[in-house]
């Protein structure tokens, strides 16, 4: 029996209430997501490092793993990933998730882009990241990431803002509750529920420092969580309006940092990060110079700094980690539009060496 759709202006929220009955002909619509070269949605203000494309395919209904799925191809010349005279780019499935929008038995598939000669496409940053992670499995590294975003109305203005001017000063919005403090929580709740349904390791969410700005946190980054948000009009811009600085923040604790005496390894890693500050900034997102100004809880883009409980530093060590002497640290330099694969790859490479 089809469930009634609740009264809601948001299609994302309504989709989560749809029937999970299989298609009548027992076939399974499949959605494949991949990262490509440039932005195709002007309103989303996405950047090359954060853009995601989608392809729909119909398969026989059954349980699928990445190895069970066929390799697809698409026109790479339309996404600036290949020239027109050699345009085929291949999609190799690497992860499968339950589809929270269409329900069972539909699936979402994360795919890597590969060129016709059998090499990873130049925008396939996941491949090198996975290669480096595999080379350092003995260290048992893990990453948690905070992703900030801003929800926009059809005029490309943050939801809940006055038509002219700005809202009241910052203060009541961060982790706020109730009218006048937060807006569009139903979209945030729908996204949270969609991630849980799909098996994305989302660990939490909260309102940020201005109206319509939100954050969610995930554990190991699987590259699919962002695709569940841009079905609404949102921006991952690192500086959507004056006075804000959205961020994509990784935390990193390999095994040696998590035990007694781990502070030595944390400080060693921070020294290595300082030595490659410019290289990291180069892959930490577009327009990051507008964000890393030394204001709005950021460090200056041309200076490296670190400290305990200091959100104005490049690297923050949480207060409890400083007190215990072991744990993890947080890199606060990546912008909200940065690519988690590029972030985690260069952090591992800098702290522990390249995969080759």
Image (tube, rainbow, N blue to C red):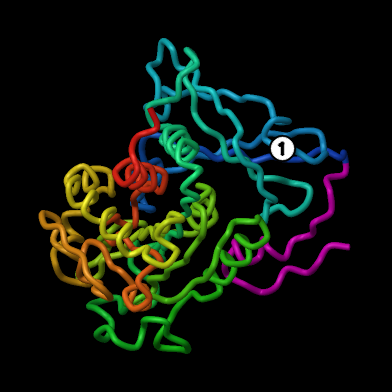
- Compared with 193, 66 (above or below) is above
Q: Mark 1 highlights which residue?
A: 65
Is 78 situated left or right of 337 in this image? right
143 and 235: which one is in front?
143
Q: How many marks?
A: 1
Taking the spot 70% from the left edge, 45% from the top edge, the residue there is 107
Residue 225, x across and y down, in percent: 53, 54
**Secondary structure of the magenta portion, mostly?**
loop
Q: Residue furthest left?
A: 302
Residue 171, x across and y down, in percent: 29, 87
Taking the spot 27% from the left edge, 43% from the top edge, the residue there is 283
In which quadrant of the rendered image does the C terminus lie? top left
19 and 210: which one is in front?
210
Assess whether residue 260 is covered by the magenta stretch: no
Taking the spot 17% from the left edge, 58% from the top edge, the residue there is 290
330 and 41: which one is in front?
330
Assess whether residue 17 is covered by the magenta stretch: yes
156 and 116: which one is in front?
116
Write down the quadrant of residue 71 in the picture. Answer: top right
Q: Residue furthest front?
A: 261
Residue 142, x across and y down, in percent: 48, 54
Taking the spot 45% from the left edge, 41% from the top edge, the residue there is 136
Write down the quadrant of residue 326 in the picture. Answer: bottom left
In which quadrant of the rendered image does the N terminus lie? bottom right
State the extent of the magenta-drawn residues as a range.
Answer: 1-24
Element carrying mark 1: loop
- Compared with 201, 133 (above or below) is above
Q: Residue furthest top?
A: 85
Q: Residues within 10 Å of mark 1 (few under 14, many from 20)?
A: few
């Amino acid at each position: 029996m089809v469930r009634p759709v609740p009264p809601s202006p948001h299609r994302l929220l309504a989709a989560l209430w749809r029937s999970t009955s299989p298609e009548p002909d027992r076939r399974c619509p499949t959605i494949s997501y991949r990262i490509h070269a440039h932005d195709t949605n002007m309103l989303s203000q996405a950047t090359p490092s954060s853009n995601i494309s989608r392809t729909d395919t119909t398969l026989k209904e059954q349980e699928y793993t990445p190895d069970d799925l066929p390799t697809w191809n698409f026109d790479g010349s339309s996404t600036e990933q290949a020239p027109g005279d050699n345009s085929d780019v291949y999609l190799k499935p690497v992860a499968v998730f339950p589809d929270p929008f269409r329900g069972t038995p539909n699936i979402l598939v994360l795919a890597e882009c590969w060129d016709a000669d059998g090499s990873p496409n130049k925008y396939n940053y996941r491949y090198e990241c996975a290669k480096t992670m595999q080379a350092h499995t003995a260290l048992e590294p893990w990453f948690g990431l905070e992703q900030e975003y801003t929800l926009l109305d059809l005029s490309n203005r943050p939801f809940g803002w006055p038509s002219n001017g700005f809202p009241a000063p910052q203060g009541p919005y961060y982790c706020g509750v109730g009218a006048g403090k937060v807006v569009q929580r139903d979209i945030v709740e729908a996204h949270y529920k969609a991630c849980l349904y799909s098996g994305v390791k989302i660990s939490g969410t909260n309102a940020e420092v201005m109206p319509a700005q939100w954050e969610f946190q995930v554990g190991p980054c699987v590259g699919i969580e962002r695709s569940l948000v841009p079905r609404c009009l949102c921006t991952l811009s690192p500086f959507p309006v004056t006075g804000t600085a959205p961020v994509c923040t990784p935390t990193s604790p390999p095994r040696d940092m998590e035990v007694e005496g781990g502070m030595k390894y944390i400080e060693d890693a921070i020294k290595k990060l300082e030595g490659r500050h410019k290289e990291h900034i180069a892959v930490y997102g577009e327009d990051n110079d507008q964000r890393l100004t030394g204001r709005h809880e950021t460090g200056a883009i041309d200076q490296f700094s670190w400290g305990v409980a200091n959100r104005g530093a490049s690297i923050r060590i949480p207060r409890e980690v400083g007190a215990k002497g072991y744990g993890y640290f947080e890199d606060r330099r990546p912008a909200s539009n940065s690519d988690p694969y590029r972030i985690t790859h260069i952090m591992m490479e800098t702290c522990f060496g390249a995969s080759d």
